[in-house]
Each structure stands twice: as C-alpha cells, then as structure tokens.
Amino acid sequence: MYQRLIKHFKNYLKMKLRTEALLSSYESRNFCHVVNINISGEKLKPKLNYEYLCDPQNFSHIETLICLRKGVGNIRKVVDLYYKAISLPADAPERELLEVELEKEASLVPNEASPHLFEYGEEPRLIEFVNKKPEFNFQPKELHEIGQKLDILRTENLGLLTGSRSYFFRGALADLEQALIRYTVSHLVKEGFTIMSVPDLLSSSIIESCGMSTKGERSQVYRIEGTDDLCLSGTAEMALGGYLRNRQYQFHDLPLKMAAVSRCYRAETSNLREERGIYRVHGFTKCEMFGVTASENGQESQDLYNEIIQIQREMFSNLGIHFQILDMPLHDLGAPAYSKVDFEAWMPGRKAFGEISSASNCTDYQSRRLNISYKNKNGEQKFVHTVNGTACAIPRMLIALCETFQSEDGTITIPPALQPYVSGLEKINQHDHVPCKMTWIKRKTYAGKIL
C-alpha cells in the first residue's frame, strides 16, 4: 500500500514539474500567465470581507446602504453570527454550522456603493441626451403594428407553441437582427474585445456568485428539472464570469476585455401595457461586454467602466436613435453594482423612453465569490474588479430602430450604419414579402376519429 502511495506521489511530482515547465514556456512567449487555483474542481467558498463587514465602525454605514438599496441583507445578524463563530474552538461542530449560516447571510449584503449616489434620493441623474428626438407628420405606430403589416413579426397566438412573452422574426426583421449582431461584434473587436461563445446552461452556484438569486418565487431564473442544479443563463455576463472562476492572473495581464453573443432566458412577469410585444420577453438575443481589471486603487475599474459607457454611447449614437444616459440611484442597483448607468431610447410609437442597455462597475463583489484574483507588482494576491455592459439587447433595439425610422406608408428605412451588414436592403417594404395567411382554429383538439 505504501509503495503504491509513493508511486502516485512520484507521478504527481513529475506532472507538477511538466506543468511548471509548460507555464514557464508560455510565459516566455508573452502568453497570458494564468494559474488555475482549484484544478480539482472542488467548490470553493466565497472569500467575503468579514473584516470590513464586522467592523463596528462600518455597522451604521452598511445598515444605511442596505436600507437605501433593496432592503435585502441583515448586517446585525451577520455580526452576531460572526462573533458567535469565532468564540468557539475551530474544530467545534457548532462553529461549522454557524459558519455555513454566516456565509449565507453575509452573501446577501449588497456591494459597497459609490459615495456620490447617497446624494441622489429616489431619482436618477440625467447625464445627457444624445441625438435629436425624431419628429413625424403622422401618428407613429408601435413595432407590433408595423411588423404585422409588413409580415415580419409574430407575437400573437403563441400560447400553445412557445408560451407567452415570445416572438418570431421573419424575413427582413430577422435579417436586421443579424445585422445588429454583426455591427456590434465588429465594433467590439475594433475596441480590443475578445469574442467568446458561451453555454446557455450554468450551475446555480455560478449564477448566484454573479449576484442573481436562483431560488424563491420572485427569482427570474429558469431552473432545469432532472439535472444537477443547472439553470438557463440570464446573460452572458454569468458565463464569462464562470469561465474565469478560480483563476489567478499577473498584474501585466490586466485588463481583460471579453464579449459574447448569447440567448438570454428570464422568467419575466409584467402586466404593464408599455411592456407588451417584444419589450419584455422570456428569451432573447443579447451581446454583452465583460471586463476584468486590477484593484490597486479602484481607478482601474472606474476607467474601464467609463470606457464601456463611451463604447455604448458611440454604437447607439451611430445608429441614429435618440436616447438618454442616466446615472442610477441606490435603490435601482442590483446587489453586485458599485455604480450603474442606464441607456434609455426614445420609442416614438410608445411615446416613451425604454431601457435598451446598462453598464455596471461591480468592483470585487463577483471576484470574491468566483475566486478571481491577480498578483500585483509586489507579489501580493488581490481580488480583481469586474465591469459589465450591454452592447446590444436585440428586441428593444429593434423597437427603437423600427419606430424611429418608420415612414407613413408603413415601410422602415435601414439606418446607414447598418446597411453594410444587411442583405442589400435600404428599406423594408411590404412587397418584399409574400404575406403568410393563416386561419386560426379555435378548437384545441381534433374532434374526429383518428385512424
């Protein structure tokens, strides 16, 4: 038995030496030097900052922060559990149980927030309006009306086919969807983003580490029955964060800029009239940006956050839509966000602004839960900061574009910035399509005899 153990240990040492040689070889070729801290794949506990959370001097501030955000989290309970746990011997069974409960409660406490947001109150601050609001000499229609006339969109009578809050794009509208993806990806590649293709199924632990709850009646996450705790991803941000889980980078490897086009699934519920059609749906295509920076002074993530906002502004501005940029107040921030900006486009048919994008600086909230770190120039291991932003949420961008560029005759002009990416179209006309005529059968079951 001992000889077998010695043999396994020798094999382990050989593999370790080979791995180190390979890493050294990659480093010498200026490859991104990455260490996977948890090669075995074992689940790692989040590295929460208990020193900060349980410092009596921070108690009042954290309690105010929780109150001004969404009221989720109980810092009193966290502090109580922490001091109970550390008062017990390290090997006491009671301590282990307390630490499990402590981790659960501490994970609910939201991220710190930018100091300037405490002055905002309930309303966001307008940063700027971009592009002129379109004017019409006729009553502009909503996309579902335009789409029906042109036979390029179907959202009705889908209950038995896909369920509610779904859609089909057809012909030129499907072409326009692909044009938006190509336009966005092309722009992001020029901005130095690495394009990724990501899975739609993720472990619930990855989704929760990114800051979205997968449990409870109000969860927007679809869970897959009959699997080992798998869920449908609500945004590529989660998959990109999960891809980097348990990795340690070198200071000179940062920042990282990644982007992915993916399907996003959300158990949305809304009875608001302004959220009908394809504005709020259960599944849609989105292009997401995700960035990782050092955290030496906090300015690194702020700089990338500002860069992502400028990229969003430029891409949306070039499309010719009118939109406003808003710095969002504390109550509108999700648990991971230190600060958040929303982009709202004018939708003429709806006669209202609608959110088409957002960007968030999450500082070390996600990296502490996903265990993503780096070594700085002094050899100190620190948690990275993460930043994310929506480059293009297809359905809502299509609403803004089609309603902005509609004509009185019911046609849609393709914005010049998108024309190189469509199939030679400058305008979507009714005669471009042969109308698909359907007769709706009210009876849901066949009444006759099946042979």
Image (tube, grey):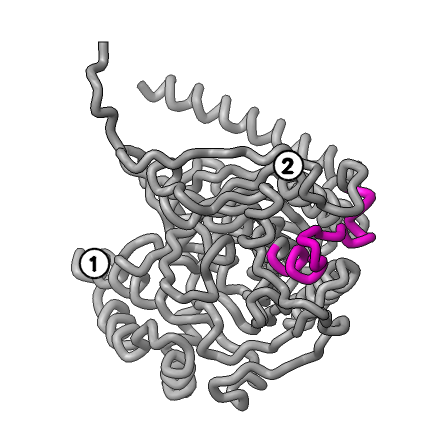
Taking depth in this image into account, of 320 and 430 the one nearest to the observer is 430
Q: Does residue 291 appear in this view?
A: no
Question: Residue, x 43% and y 46% (percent of image)?
Answer: 156
Quadrant containing the N terminus in the rendered view: top left
Question: Residue, x 67% and y 43% (percent of image)?
Answer: 430
Q: What element does badge 1 sit on?
A: helix
Going from N to C along the chain, the mark reached first, 2 or 1, is 1
Q: Position of residue 93 (x, y in %)?
A: 17, 56
* Residue ranking furthest to the top: 451
Mark-to-mark CA distance, 2 and 1:
58 Å
Q: What element does badge 2 sit on?
A: loop
Question: Residue, x 27% and y 57% (percent of image)?
Answer: 216
Q: Residues within 10 Å of mark 2 (few under 14, many from 20)?
A: some
Q: Name the residue tied to disc 2.
A: 171
Q: Is residue 419 magenta?
A: yes
Asked if residue 215 is positioned above or below residue 110 in the image, the reply reads above
Kind of residue indicated by mark 2: Gly
Q: Is residue 282 magenta?
A: no
Kindly check if marks 2 and 1 are in contact, taking CB atoms under 8 A apart as contact: no
Quadrant containing the C terminus in the rendered view: top left
Q: Position of residue 143 (x, y in %)?
A: 58, 55
Taking depth in this image into account, of 245 and 263 the one nearest to the observer is 263
Left/right of residue 373 with respect to residue 215 in the rendered view: right
Taking depth in this image into account, of 367 and 126 the one nearest to the observer is 126
Taking depth in this image into account, of 336 and 146 the one nearest to the observer is 146
Q: Residues within 10 Å of mark 1 (few under 14, many from 20)?
A: few
Q: Quadrant of residue 324?
A: bottom right
Magenta region: 399-421
Identify the mark at residue 97; answer none if there is no mark: 1
Q: Does residue 230 appear in this view?
A: yes
Kind of residue indicated by mark 1: Leu
Q: Position of residue 9 (x, y in %)?
A: 45, 26
